[in-house]
Image (tube, grey):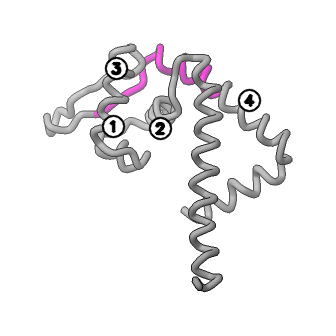
């Protein structure tokens, strides 16, 4: 019979995984109104905060490099992002948000805020704030 502490840890991992998937699924449905995915929104948000290389972006978002390349390629094709090569190291490519990308991000942020408000309406704003604080402490 497994010990209770081991089972509790496994339960926590399972609960966090299931909660993350449900949240992403629900947020994804909301972002679909703008024809965007959660990962596209995350990429736009990260790049709006600061210019990054593809490697830095992959590490910051914890997205595998091939997946990130596919996401960025789609956003570049849609004129939401653009790439520039470093003048110092031509192998280093930085990614930037275009004006069109900033406008799209503003609309996506509004949908994400509405989604979080809906969650706060169901769970209570203090619970959502506390959950955010707990998760930041885990990271």
Q: Residues within 10 Å of mark 4 (few under 14, many from 20)?
A: some
Label 1, label 4: how far apart the Cα atoms are = 27 Å
Q: Nearer the N terminus, badge 3 or badge 4?
A: 3
Label 2, label 4: how far apart the Cα atoms are = 20 Å
Q: Nearer the N terminus, badge 2 or badge 1?
A: 2
For image coordinates 58% across by 45% down, the residue present is 21
Label 3, label 4: how far apart the Cα atoms are = 27 Å
Q: Tag 3, which secondary structure?
A: helix
Quadrant of the image containing the C terminus: bottom right
Residue 135 % position (x, y): 63, 59
Q: Is residue 5 magenta?
A: no
Q: Is residue 66 above or below residue 99?
A: below
**Range drawn in magenta:** 94-109
For image coordinates 64% across by 50% down, the residue present is 19
Residue 84 % position (x, y): 25, 26
Q: Tag 2, which secondary structure?
A: helix
In the rendered image, which residue does mark 4 sit on?
Answer: 114
In the rendered image, which residue does mark 2 sit on?
Answer: 46
């Amino acid at each position: 019979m497994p010990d209770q502490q081991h089972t509790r840890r496994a339960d926590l991992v399972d609960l966090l995984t299931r909660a993350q998937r449900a949240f992403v699924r629900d947020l994804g449905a909301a972002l679909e109104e703008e024809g965007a995915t959660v990962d596209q929104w995350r990429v736009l948000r990260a790049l709006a905060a600061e210019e990054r290389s593809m490697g830095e972006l992959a590490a910051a978002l914890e997205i595998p490099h091939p997946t990130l390349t596919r996401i960025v390629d789609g956003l570049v094709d849609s004129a939401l992002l653009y790439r520039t090569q470093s003048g110092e190291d031509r192998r280093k490519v930085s990614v930037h948000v275009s004006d069109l990308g900033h406008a799209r991000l503003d609309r996506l942020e509004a949908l994400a805020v509405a989604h979080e408000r809906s969650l706060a309406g169901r769970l209570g704003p203090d619970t959502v704030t506390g959950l955010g604080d707990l998760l930041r402490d885990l990271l």
